[in-house]
Amino acid sequence: MDEILASGSKFRHVQFYRMHHQTHSPWQKSIAPKSCDVAIVGGGIMGCATAYWLSKSNPSLNIAILEAEQLAHGASGRNAGFLLLGTHTDYASAVDAMGRDQARRLWEFTAENARLIAELDQSAFDLQLSGSLIAAGDGAEAERLESSAELLTEDGVDVEHLNGAETNRRLMSNAYLAGLYVKEGGMLNPAKLVRHLAAQSQATVVEKWPVEGVESEGTGVRLYSKRGAIKAAKVVLTLNAYLPKLIPTLNQFVRPVRAQMMATEPVPHMLDHPVYSHAGFFYIRQRVDRRIMLGGARHLHLDEEVGYEDATTEPLQADLEAYLANHFPRIGTPAIERRWSGTMGFSPDSLPVVGCVPGVPNSTYATGFTGHGMGFSVRFGKLLARAVLGGKDEAGDLFSVDRLQLS
């Protein structure tokens, strides 16, 4: 992979997981079919998970995954590979915001996701079922984590509340005030998971085929690209932040937010779990090769970290380096080998949104995963597959667009 070089106020970036000169696998095709049963627009985690479950439900389905770049090119291949339970916030905050029942159902949904992923070929995407550790960056967060531990224990979830000393001992740090260890979940290679699901689905994968138009035609849907057109009986749009680029009228349900990350040279072993801190605004893990991956600091640059520009910035990257130095001083100042960014899709209430494109009856879209897509991923693909096949998912109401009363 390319070296990362500072240039003016921006850094040249790469995807940490994706090799630049990958070749097509036997199941990939560069030529799009003229027609298919289900066309999935977007070759990220949601699109490939949907294809996987569609194939399992009906192996005779002719499924095409249409990707503008390569599989896992976007946020699905650029995230830290955290397999977390719950939503983007701590459990106590979720209960306060949406009520106990909905918070519990969302936790159970993500717990089922973790179990479904564990049932796959774990070696195919480097799964480590390590659990995860949420660390408190201030006193208010420490109180929320203590409340979260009590609520989760009452709801039958196996968690462990940690005081500051124990949290810092486990993380080889001296800066955290408390912690919450969640025993399910862990870490994985997200791009490998995307490709594994695509391979298992036996779908036709067409890369470098950006869809530029979707319209209803007869009993089906027609999709347009500069490279041609495809007629599908049904279409699923799994573009997340990029959905409004294709369907502008859906911009009220998702907005683009940039995330930045960096990776160090290999350092001595220090982290056994993925760590989520400062209300999720910092996240860090150590790979098997002992490189540290760190992302976040967006809350310190909210005005700048919006939109679709794919770039890293010196001020935010400096804040990531300062976080690493302040919270993990024992590793010194390791060299930074990679810096990169990715675009996330945030919904109005921070939960995913599922609906039908206005004027296109045989369509389904999913968007607004708010930086937590891997926690929903495979289970969400199952939900979308059920929707496409006309079935009902018991969690469907949690994510239906009908909940959002927007003008």
Image (spheres, helix red, strand yellow):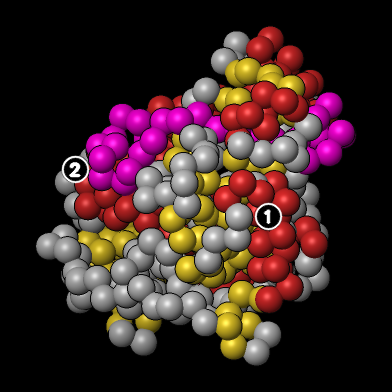
Give the residue type that dot 1 points to: Ala
x then y, percent, for residue 318: 70, 68
Label 2 with label 1: CB-CB less than 8 Å: no
Q: Residue at x 66, y 12 (%)?
A: 153
Q: Quadrant of the C terminus?
A: bottom right
> Magenta span has 123?
yes
Give the residue type that dot 2 points to: Pro
x then y, percent, for residue 51: 32, 50
Q: Which residue is mark 1?
A: 325
259 or 139, which is in the foreground?
139
Give how far apart the Cα atoms at labels 2 and 1 are: 51 Å
The crowd level at tag 2 (other Cα within 10 Å; few <14, some 14-19, many 20+) is some
Q: Residue at x 72, y 38 (%)?
A: 174
> Magenta span has 76?
no
Q: Name the disc covering residue 59, or none.
A: 2
174 or 213, which is in the foreground?
174
Q: Is residue 386 left or right of residue 11?
A: left
Give the residues drawn in magenta, as a range: 117-143
Q: Quadrant of residue 235?
A: bottom left
Q: Name the disc covering residue 356, or none.
A: none
| 2 vs 1, front mark | 1
212 or 297, which is in the foreground?
297
Q: Secondary structure at mark 2?
A: loop
The crowd level at tag 1 (other Cα within 10 Å; few <14, some 14-19, many 20+) is some
Q: Is residue 34 left or right of residue 213?
A: left
Q: Secondary structure at mark 1?
A: helix
Q: Is residue 221 left or right of residue 132?
A: left
294 or 95, which is in the foreground?
294
